[in-house]
Image (cartoon, helix red, strand yellow):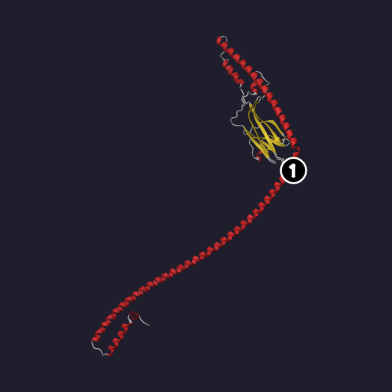
């Protein structure tokens, strides 16, 4: 093999050197050839030094290339590791994607099954509802056919009852108007008498013929006292009450318990079959009740149709809950009323200044009740 020196020295110079050596060995040259041989040696040494420096430079380049190769190999290995981890992550992601797709397909399948079940249930509900509607329609048609036979007679009976009631109301109104006119005339007579007495007292006082004692009232005080006594009670319509009229000189029939109306409530409601209807009544805080008065509830209602019946209750206090209604204190409970009725009850406002009216149609399975009711809160005087 060739050494590093052989690689550094050119072949032409190596040939020339061998040729000169062969001539020197032959000994056929003069001394000038020996001088030229010494210059060749110095050139060879110079070239040898240059070759060594080049060899050192090449070795440093080789070492740098080797280090770079090692670095590149490490980077290659690191990139291979990263590629492997990326492939593993990609594989995991693909597996997760497949699992997610499978779960999504399963959820969609379950959703479709549930939608199918809901559609079947809705179809059954629609069928049942349609059957119920048809059955109710047939039942209504049957009831209508049955009721048509007697509807005319009931309508006529209702009109007759209304005519009778209107006649009674007309008679009562006429009688009330006549009594009111008589009471007004009596009051006017009494006022005229009192005014004449006051004028007479005033004229006597001006003439000095009459004087009042110190402890007695003056004429103005007597007049104002008489007027206050006369207009002691006035109801919401501005008319004098029965107590005021009876207290003025014995005009009209006397009454043991004068009364005054506090308020009137009226309304209507429809109570369905098997249901309960109620109305809540309260005494407002500004309602003034005298210590010698008690409040009674005067109730009246009519049923439509008039041949039906219902159970009526009056409870003390406000009771909207069904359980509370069962245990509540009652003025009366489940009174059987047919067609309509009315009456008075005391103590209805003893609890919470309120009461609850209840109409129960629980005994009926088919027919509703239409109720038109009216109640009055009346304050009456009571005595032991």
Indicate the quadrant containing the N terminus: top left, top right, bottom left or bottom right. Answer: bottom left
State whether residue 230 is above or below residue 366. Answer: above
- Place of residue 333 in the rendered image (x, y in percent of width and height, measured from the top left): 69, 35
Q: Nearer the viewer, residue 331 or 75?
A: 75
State whether residue 93 appears in this view: yes
User: Does residue 133 lie above or below 353 as drawn?
Assistant: below
Q: Position of residue 76 (x, y in %)?
A: 44, 69
- Identify the residue at image location x=36%, y=75%: 59
Q: Position of residue 291 (x, y in %)?
A: 62, 26
Give the mark count: 1
Q: Quadrant of residue 339?
A: top right
Quadrant assignment for the C terminus? top right
Residue wearing tag 1: 142
Residue at point 68% right, 24% down? 174
At x 73%, y 41%, the residue is 144
Tell me the quarter of the picture where residue 379 sits. Answer: top right
At x 59%, y 60%, the residue is 105
Where is residue 110 shown, x and y percent of the image? Answer: 62, 57
3 shown above or below 288: below
- As drawn, is 31 to the left or to the right of 182? left
């Amino acid at each position: 093999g060739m050494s590093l020196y052989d690689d550094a020295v050119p072949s032409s110079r190596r040939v020339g050197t061998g040729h000169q050596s062969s001539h020197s060995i032959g000994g056929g040259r003069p001394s000038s050839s020996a001088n030229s041989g010494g210059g060749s040696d110095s050139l060879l040494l110079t070239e040898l030094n240059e070759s060594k420096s080049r060899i050192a430079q090449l070795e440093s380049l080789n070492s740098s290339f080797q280090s770079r190769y090692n670095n590149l190999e490490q980077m290659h290995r690191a990139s291979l590791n990263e590629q492997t981890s990326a492939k593993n992550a990609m594989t995991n992601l693909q597996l997760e994607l497949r699992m997610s797709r499978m779960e999504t397909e399963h959820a969609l399948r379950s959703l479709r099954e549930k939608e199918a079940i809901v559609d079947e249930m809705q179809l059954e509900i629609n069928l049942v509802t349609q059957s119920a509607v048809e059955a109710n329609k047939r039942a209504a048609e049957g009831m209508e056919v049955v009721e048509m036979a007697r509807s005319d007679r009931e309508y006529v009976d209702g009109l007759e009852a209304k005519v009778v009631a209107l006649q009674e109301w007309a008679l009562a109104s006429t009688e009330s108007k006549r009594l009111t006119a008589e009471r007004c005339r009596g009051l006017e007579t009494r006022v005229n008498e009192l005014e004449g007495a006051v004028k007479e007292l005033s004229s006597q006082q001006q003439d000095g013929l009459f004087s009042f004692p110190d402890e007695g009232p003056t004429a103005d005080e007597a007049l104002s006292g008489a007027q206050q006594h006369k207009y002691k009670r006035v109801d919401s319509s501005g008319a004098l009450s029965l107590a005021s009229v009876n207290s003025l000189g014995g005009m009209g029939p006397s009454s043991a318990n004068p009364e005054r109306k506090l308020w009137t409530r009226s309304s209507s409601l429809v109570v369905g079959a098997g249901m309960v209807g109620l109305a809540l009544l309260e005494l407002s805080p500004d309602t003034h009740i005298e210590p010698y008065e008690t409040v009674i509830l005067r109730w009246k209602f009519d049923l439509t149709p008039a041949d039906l019946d219902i159970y009526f209750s009056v409870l003390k206090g406000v009771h909207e809950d069904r359980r509370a209604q069962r245990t509540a204190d009652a003025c009366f409970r489940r009174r059987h009323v047919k067609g309509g009725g009315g009456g008075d009850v005391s103590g209805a406002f003893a609890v919470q200044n309120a009461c609850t009216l209840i109409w129960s149609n629980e005994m009926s399975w088919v027919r509703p009740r239409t109720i038109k009711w009216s109640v009055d809160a009346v304050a009456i005087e009571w005595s032991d």
